[in-house]
Amino acid sequence: GDELVTAVDRVMAHADARARMLVRANADTPEDAARARRFGAQGIGLCRTEHMFLGDRRQLVEKLILAETDEERFAALDALEPLQRADFEGIFEAMDGLPVTIRLIDPPLHEFLPDLTELSVKVALAGADADPQDRRLLEAVTRLHEQNPMLGLRGVRLGLAIPGLFMMQVKAIAEAAVARKEAGGDPRPEIMIPLVGAVQELEAVREEAEGVLRHVAESTGVAVHTLVGTMIEVPRAALTAGQIAESAEFFSFGTNDLTQMTWGFSRDDVEAAFFSRYLELGIFGVSPFETLDRDGVGRLVRIAVEEGRATRPDLKLGICGEHGGDPDSVHFCHEAGLDYVSCSPFRVPVARLEAGRAAIETGGSDSR
Ligand code: PEP
Ligand code: MG
């Protein structure tokens, strides 16, 4: 019992001491953040914010979707902002003193909108008696419907399409950080823009975000150092990393999407019949969604690391796709020169061990 715990603790401490990479966790709630900390996570590498728009907040999202004027849209956003601020305060508190990377909203639109079929049936069944609100919603949802939501209005595209949406989140992050600092805490926010493929997309968001951050700092008199960076998850982003680094203080590789888009395999259909055929034929030994495909996706990661650092030598580099908790992929990340991996809380210990092992095998902890 106790002896084993002590032995495990010693091994973990040894791994941590030798590792060059830090291990963070993907966590979206204060509970997950606290759990991740218990497993030894050194921050949050990905806080997804999509779930903060579901549940009993759906009504506000519907208002946002239905807004026909700027006034209506900003009213819906203003109602969401304090809820978001409270979400972020809880997470900053749980991760006090450690970096928290908050990713601005990135839902495939079909997960965000009311279901088109359900709504159509509801309106059709009600006939002439249909709720006018439902009719308007059906109109809006029909207009926004996409054949390929995974390649559609997601991430930064959504942020640029709905003015005010991203900035509502940025303001909530900034105010939550100020509140934590005023309460004696040490919040370390990092704002991450998803699905960027061109530096121009990032610049547009970044400029506006810096304005909001400045405004909050000036109006509260409290300054919180906040990084702004991007995910690298569209192949074009990896290939133009040198340009993108002009506008990003950090990169985090979203290898779920990067794998999907590099292979052209749908993430939603990974169980499709042909996958087992591919395994049988040895086209890959394991699914590239589980273990990072070094030849294809890995090549893009290496290009982005090299070109990103050429532009900005102090660029912080991490990974937050599922691969961040897979030992072979963690090993690759060390070789590629990343600063941290981020994975689900339960995989943090394994990632810590592998980060240490990779450093030992490649000769010491100062290989960079
Ligand atoms: C990714 O694409 O690897 C990623 C971390 O983002 P998400 O899984 O939320 O698309
Ligand atoms: Mg992604």
Image (tube, rainbow, N blue to C red):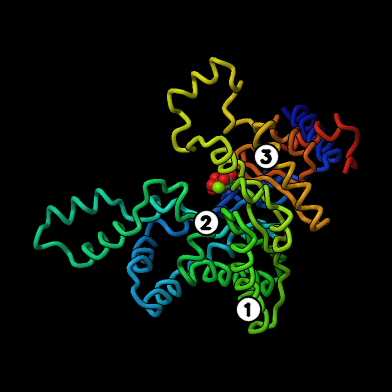
Mark 2 Cβ inside 8 Å of ligand 2: yes
Indicate which disc, 3 or 1, sits on the residue closer to the N terminus: 1
Closest to the observer: 290 or 308?
308
Residue 155 is tagged as 2
Q: Residue at x 40, y 78 (%)?
A: 70
Vertical comparison of 53 with 321: above or below: below
Can you tell which of label 3 and label 2 is closer to the viewer? Answer: 2
Measuring from the top left, give residue 202's x and y in whole percent.
62, 62
Q: How many marks?
A: 3
Q: Residue at x 9, y 62 (%)?
A: 128
Residue 348 is tagged as 3
Q: Secondary structure at mark 1?
A: helix
The residue carrying mark 1 is: 216
Closest to the observer: 314 or 246?
246
The Cα atoms of the two marked residues, 2 and 1, are separated by: 24 Å
Residue 182 image-quadrant placement: bottom right
Indicate which disc, 2 or 1, sits on the residue closer to the N terminus: 2
The Cα atoms of the two marked residues, 3 and 2, are separated by: 26 Å
The Cα atoms of the two marked residues, 3 and 1, are separated by: 34 Å
Indicate which disc, 3 or 2, sits on the residue closer to the N terminus: 2
